Amino acid sequence: MPDLNELTGNGQRVPATEPDKVPFSPDDEFGVSTRAFEEQFGESILETLNVEKWRIGIDLNEEFRRFRDEVREAEQSENSKEKEIRERFFPLLAKLENMPKNAGKHEALQEDLEATHRGLLFNGGVEACDGIVQIHDTLPLTIYQIGVSLVSYQGDQNNWGQRFFRHELRRKGIDVDELIQFLERRDRRDSSTRPPGGDQLGELVQNAMLQYAERAVLLRHSQAVWRMGHGNPVTYELLTGGNNLDLMVLATEMLRELIEQRQRFVFVASEPRDRLYLTIGQALRPMEYAIMGTLDDRLGTWFRQARFKIGVSKKLLWDQELIDSAEWIPRFIERVASKVVVGLFRTTLLAPPQVFYAHEDHSKIAAHIAIADSMLRVQGTPLLLHMAQHTCNAVFGDSLEALAEQAYAAAGAHNRYFSGRSHRVRS
């Protein structure tokens, strides 16, 4: 998606010439230059961190005046930028090269939204899915529980759950020799490896496996014409498989079926994290949406990282064609992710803009479904997704902890579970 400042009046891209404005890769997300800090905060990082100039205590009157002036100036700048985006940026979207169908800003008409309510949402034509991961973590045993719920407005709901019992820690624990080697590497100032006992598998379970489960339930179990999911349909964890080649292939093949064959899906993310998207979204009026570009643009920036080159010596089968595993992700981005559009919508002036994803051939209906469902909540987010999340919490809730407590009690370790840690992770 183009930056507003990269466009000339005739809609042609111009190359960025300032080295300091080259976008960071996700690996560099915490990197910031001295110049960038000064541009954004109006003072050097050394001045900011000079505690001798910090105020003692809080003068509420003075702080309020400063907050008021800063907010007023920011709002004036934002209003000016919104006007410029509506007058210059939105009209250019549809004229740019390599843009998807329906690119640009559109208004969802009231009669079309009412038809979407009657013809799709309220008669069960759309089903939404959401899930959670719960973890019971103790020294003798770690238990993972994945729960996924599928709901519709007809009152239908189904729930799927899976539990994993991690035996590796119970069987092995932390190898003392590994701990000694780690201390020796620290003594040599070698920080190339993680400390022993790190829970890489836990991160994989929490992210990639939950995201896979949600999308697989939508694909395999939903009988609705349209399927609604949470977040980006092609997440970083699914695209890489958490550095697991088998999971990468399984996840991307499932996503191919969802995107290339099913096509009628809409995924809605939360408020945009990208400041550019947030700025553009704030320029939308209620019941407006904008198709900004395709998902391959965003995924292409991820691909340049070395972690995508897993299993490079293996051959994989793509539609009866054997290809190098290193070619798998680039081909997926080029042929599959390029069919997914990225858009923004807004329901009220009081609600923040939302990001949505849909197949390029069905983006107009997908946008109307997202807006029509989000009209039903003050927060401006899809009510159906909220119902799926609420159902998932109600069904699975504290079931993992209850089962674990009873099992420890039956084993004669009544207080064992109190030393454990339990938490939930949503997608």
Image (spheres, grey):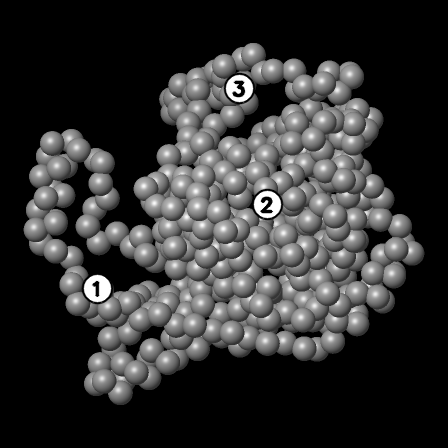
Residue 375 visible in the current orientation: no
Residue 183 visible in the current orientation: yes
Crowd rating for badge 3 (residues with CA inside 10 Å; few <14, some 14–19, many 20+):
few
Mark 3–mark 2 distance (CA, rounded to whole Å):
30 Å
Query: Reading the chain from its start, which is encountered first: label 2 or label 1?
Result: 1
| Quadrant of residue 144 within the rendered picture | bottom left
Which numbered dot is residue 313? none
Q: Position of residue 47 (x, y in %)?
A: 43, 18
Residue at 68% across / 67% down in the picture?
127
Q: Which residue is mark 3?
A: 21
Q: Residue furthest top?
A: 17
Mark 2–mark 1 distance (CA, rounded to whole Å):
39 Å
Q: Is residue 121 left or right of residue 421?
A: right
* Front residue (pair 87, 308): 308
Which kind of residue does numbered mark 1 sit on? Leu
Q: Which residue is mark 2?
A: 336
402 over 349 or under it: above or below: below
Mark 1–mark 3 distance (CA, rounded to whole Å):
46 Å
Crowd rating for badge 1 (residues with CA inside 10 Å; few <14, some 14–19, many 20+):
some
